[in-house]
Image (tube, rainbow, N blue to C red):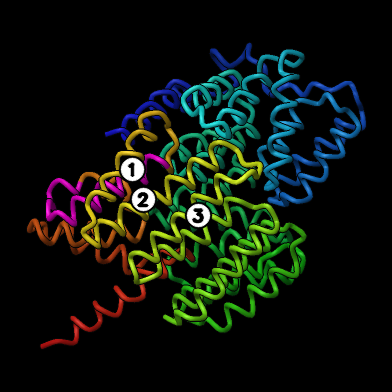
Amino acid sequence: MLNRWCACLLVLLSSVAFADGKSNPASGAHKNLPTKLPVTTSSVEARKRFEKAMQNLEYIRSADALNDLRRSVKADPNFAQALILISHLSRDPDEQRATRSQAQLLAARVSPGERLLIRWLAGVQEDNYVPAIAAMNDLLTKYPQDQRLAFLAGGWLVRQERYGQAVVVLERAVTLAPDYPAALNELGYAYAFGGDFEKGFVAMERYVALQPDQPNPHDSYGEILRLAGRFDAALEQYRMSIRIDPNFGSELGVADTYSVMGKEEEAREEYARAVVFTASESDKVEYELHSAVTWIRENNRKQAERALRDVAKHAHTAGLAQLEAEAHRVLAMYDPDYKAAVKQAQAGQNALEERHELSRSDRDEEKARILRVLATRSAEAQVMDSASSAVKQLESMAQKSRSQVIQLCYHAAVGAVLMAQEKYAEAIPHLEEDSANPLSMRLLWQAYGSTGAAEQAGAMAAKLAATNVPTTEQALVVPQFRASLVSQAGQP
């Protein structure tokens, strides 16, 4: 499988980087290695601002970290490490491109370690995943005692949905520094997203205990509690975060929790509050998109379509091509009419092709998500030529890219087409690759049932019913699935 090949590559690289994870960090091969990634700048002010930025990043105050990085670059325009981190953190496509390009031009002037950092973070934006991952692992090997690097790498792996590899990296960071809050935060997410809630809770409780007066520990703990279905406890943690810092943005967590609880009107009120507390246009559009999905949960088609079109217009006006495409993709998933769905998918593809600045990885990954929707909707409508065409495009993308998103979209699309052809046994291994997505989970449950795998079907049904992520896929699948289980349980 393409996805398994990529995962095996990363496991191999990670095993090399952390082969001595149980040894004494101060002994053996590590004793002659530098402990921290160098910071190359001749400006005292730039260095001061950079350190403040990294501290804010560890507090998960990304907006403050970005502002400090921008100030550091103002003090030293040739500060390559600050530039590549701006590109990594920014949600502005123009700023991403400009700072990434400048960092790459300056790479020859900085230390070998900083060149690896630039190769890693620029590579993932440019969809050069294999050399990017290799650079990340080389960087971790070169600086095995740099807990901040482990935090950055572990967090990136979590967001790439590579939870097993993230645990390896982050457990190493916690071994080096047991009371390092930033690594505990990411480790808690890696455990929880990987399905081990008990370890996730332990990590988060340690995180909260280390920084009880900071908002993010409570915000993060709230998110993991919500994932586990402990909604009241999640709301308590989010509200604690808001009391500590009303400007931090935990209203979004409250809103998402209300949404998966089925309290959609309350959720919309909280999303409206969350919009007020962000200055980022991309965040505003994203919150509006979350709010629009509440109408899907209420099965109010008229309001959902109106809200989603408003989101697409807002994103278009703001020049946010990916979010514009995503709004159309959600409409393509939701519209019951196949031809209308295809038009929405095409509108999403058109948005990606407009002359808006967008990194190659963001563009290709959103394109893959749209192709997945096209393949799935076409297969459901038995328009197999269109379904096959979308799958072929995804296969070509998956062969060229090691993006986790593209790999999962390819397998999900193949699995959906095979299910429509009633080739259940063949569909299973593809759908298992995407077994965290409610759309694939529902198909996988059906495939297990159709092949007589009753135990696997039961386990998948339980997992699907317990899925509490505030996504469109969850809104489209999980509430109806839960209702169907209740209905079946009530039948004689």
- What residue is shown with label 1? 410
Residue 36 vs residue 338, the one in the foreground: 338
Q: Please provide the residue range marked out in magenta.
A: 406-428
Disc number at residue 348? Answer: 3
As shown in the figure, which amino acid type bears the numbered disc 1?
Tyr
**Residue 43 place in picture, x, y as percent:** 91, 25
Q: How far apart are the alpha carbons under marks 3 and 2?
A: 12 Å
Q: Is mark 1 on a helix, strand or loop?
A: helix
User: Looking at the image, is mark 3 or mark 2 earlier in the sequence?
Assistant: 3
Q: How far apart are the alpha carbons under marks 1 and 3?
A: 18 Å
**Quadrant of the image occupied by residue 488:** bottom left
As shown in the figure, which amino acid type bears the numbered disc 2?
Arg
Q: Does the magenta stretch include residue 347?
A: no
User: Which residue appears at 42% of the width and 80% of the height?
Assistant: 299
Q: How far apart are the alpha carbons under marks 1 and 2?
A: 7 Å
User: Looking at the image, is mark 1 or mark 3 earlier in the sequence?
Assistant: 3
> Looking at the image, do the residues carrying marks 1 and 2 touch, with CB atoms under 8 Å apart?
yes
Residue 421 vs residue 469, the one in the foreground: 421
Q: What element carries label 3?
A: helix
**Residue 160 place in picture, x, y as percent:** 48, 42
